[in-house]
Image (cartoon, rainbow, N blue to C red):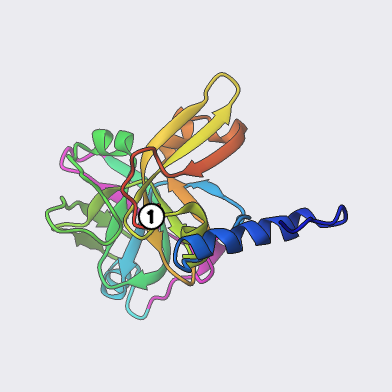
Amino acid sequence: MTQLSNSISRSQVEQLVRQALSQQMGGVASAPQTAPNPLVVNISARHIHLSQEHLEILFGKGAQLEVQKDLYQEGYFAATQTVAVVGPRRRMIPNVRVLGPCRGDTQVELAFTDTISLGLDVPIRISGDLKGTPGCVLMGPKGVVELEFGVIRAARHVHMSPADCAYYGCSNGDNLHLRIESAGCTTVLEDVVVRENPEVKLEVHIDTDEGNAVDLDHATSVKLYVPEGCKCKHS
């Protein structure tokens, strides 16, 4: 048996253990031992993604989105433009922020309390999954758009790079748990959908209702993890 020197570092010990495990598992590399990126949890307030066609109807021919503030994910931003969202009860939510850049399909993302106020029965969906969703009316300074579909309650989700997925032991489409600790209000949110993309930074999105319920503004700790019994591809 080889005797380890007293001066050997912890990182060297961990490397030896990983090598031994890799050999026992047929050469399968183990997941990284330290998180590649810090965990960020943000509230995604009600907002709209517009197609270029609808942008020009609402704000005038040739209109372009103007950047008000860059978002955490690179290349995405909150625009200066806002629109009013009108539901079947003729109730209106004014000044709903447009996010850029433009998309192929217009999509309205609301919290549960917003949908109740508008009188809409809205499903929980991953962004872009718009089939069978209700529509609404959008009012801008230059025109009106009547959407036949496109209103969703966004499923809570986490943007992850391949390195993040390897660290957490999950893959695209898996459901994770998010534990949020705050004074007197520690909560676990289940079914946080993994959205894997090599170009994103690690970030969890929850809506306004969820953020208020868990008192995210005063959270002292957040933890993302694979739930026990999950049949995730990498767990």
User: Height in image: 186 above or below 6?
Assistant: above
Q: Amino acid at mark 1?
A: Val
Q: Which residues are magenta?
A: 63-91
Between 91 and 25, the one lying in front of the other is 25
Residue at (67% x, 56% y) in the render: 14
Q: Position of residue 11 (x, y in %)?
A: 73, 58
Membership of 20 in magenta stretch: no
Residue at (17% x, 53% y) in the render: 135
Q: Tally the numbered discs.
A: 1
Between 224 and 187, the one lying in front of the other is 224
User: Height in image: 114 above or below 18?
Assistant: above
Q: Position of residue 109 (x, y in %)?
A: 32, 51
In the image, is 176 to the left or to the right of 21?
left
Res 172 seen here = yes
Res 79 seen here = no
Q: Disc 1 designates what residue? A: 194
- Binning the other alpha carbons within 10 Å of mark 1 as few (below 14), some (14 to 19) or many (20 upward) gives many
In the image, is 108 to the left or to the right of 2?
left
Residue sitting farthest toward the bottom = 62
Displayed quadrant of residue 50: bottom left
Q: Position of residue 199 (x, y in %)?
A: 49, 72
Residue at (21% x, 57% y) in the render: 150
Displayed quadrant of residue 82: bottom left
Membership of 75 in magenta stretch: yes
Secondary element at tag 1:
strand
In the image, is 109 to the left or to the right of 198?
left
In the image, is 72 to the left or to the right of 174?
right
